[in-house]
Amino acid sequence: MILNVFTITELFIELVTLILMVWAGIQSLVLGLRWKQSSSTQGKMLIEQRSHFVLLSAVIVLGIRLFNWPFFYATLQSLVPDIGGAMCIFGVTHVERTVSLIAELLKPISFFLIGAWVLIHMVDQKTETSALMGRKLIMLSLTAAVVAAESLADTAVILRTAPDTLVTCCTTVTDVLDRPTAIFPQSILGPQYASALTYAYFVGNLSVIMALALVRRAMGNNVHARWRRPALGIIFLCAIFNAGIFLLTQIEVHAPRIMHLPYHRCLYCLWQYVPDTILMYSFFILATASTGWAVILDLAGRTKETEGILQAYVCRLYGLSLLCFTASLIMNAVHLIMA
């Protein structure tokens, strides 16, 4: 492995996370099952008291994990000079490609689950009878399992990335003619797929923004709750589809223009050459995740006691999503105008 300030800090975070998440996951699963089986008020009060330390530990550790995603990539960036042939993070991830791919795939899943659990925990704290305690504990056990798996994958990436390893440059994968990101849209949209993707990007983002604004306004006017769940689900599906268009457009069209490198399509290089695009991507990820968190809140948090609280939280999430989608869109448009 390569030792520097980033790798040592990352390994410490992963070790603490792994130990606490395994412990919290087991404890929350046991307490969650006991909560469901308990029918007495006294029994549930005892379980609630025992769960305080578990929940407090989870809030602290999961809060740290929310910021570990960018720090993990900062750690990989610090390894670039020690890897032969690497121009950016892409080369580092190809030292141990399978493990790195698993770690990268787990990160958005982990981020989404952590955010959803934290929101459910916050809603439950607003109730007088801990109406969501059982669901919250079971969901914590699932979240802890995913986070623990992510920690193991991150640790494996750091430990197995040896110095002076020789890898291929990102251009040999991202800039070849038969790259998947070109073949897929070209098979659907034809040879002029680049301009079609750009139109789809702007139309998709503006459509999601308008839908969010309309549903948020309807919820503010106390539209009947039975229409809320289908609307939230449809918007989340549209946001996921929009994310796919966003990714394809960035790789094939926008990243080369923003970097002033017409034939280079590596997003890792984009973040390296134009660092503020990291913020643009963060806004987009947070905006998309917020639409999903609203769905999870409505599915897992709806009880008679939480009905009013849920509507307020969903409205706030949609407000956050609107703000982040708009900020991401404006930042991208400014970069394209200046390119």
Image: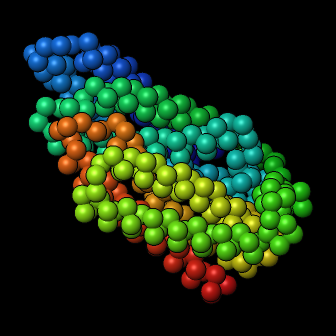
Residue 172 x, y percent position in the rendering: 86, 57
Q: Indicate left or right for 203 with 94 as reference.
A: left
Depth check, front residue: 93 or 102: 102
Depth check, front residue: 307 or 105: 307
Q: Is residue 73 above or below residue 217?
A: above
Q: Residue at x 24, y 18 (%)?
A: 35
Quadrant of the rendered structure where residue 105 is? top right
Residue furthest bottom as drawn: 338
Residue 6 x, y percent position in the rendering: 52, 50
Q: Residue at x 72, y 78 (%)?
A: 257
Residue 1 x, y percent position in the rendering: 65, 39
Kindly tell me whether residue 85 is visible in this rendering: no
Depth check, front residue: 202 or 324: 202
Q: Residue at x 28, y 57 (%)?
A: 223
Q: Is residue 19 above or below residue 266?
A: above
Residue 330 x, y percent position in the rendering: 51, 78
Q: What quarter of the picture does the C terminus occupy? A: bottom right
Depth check, front residue: 99 or 303: 303
Number of marks:
0
Kindly tell me whether residue 334 is visible in this rendering: yes
Q: Residue at x 75, y 46 (%)?
A: 94
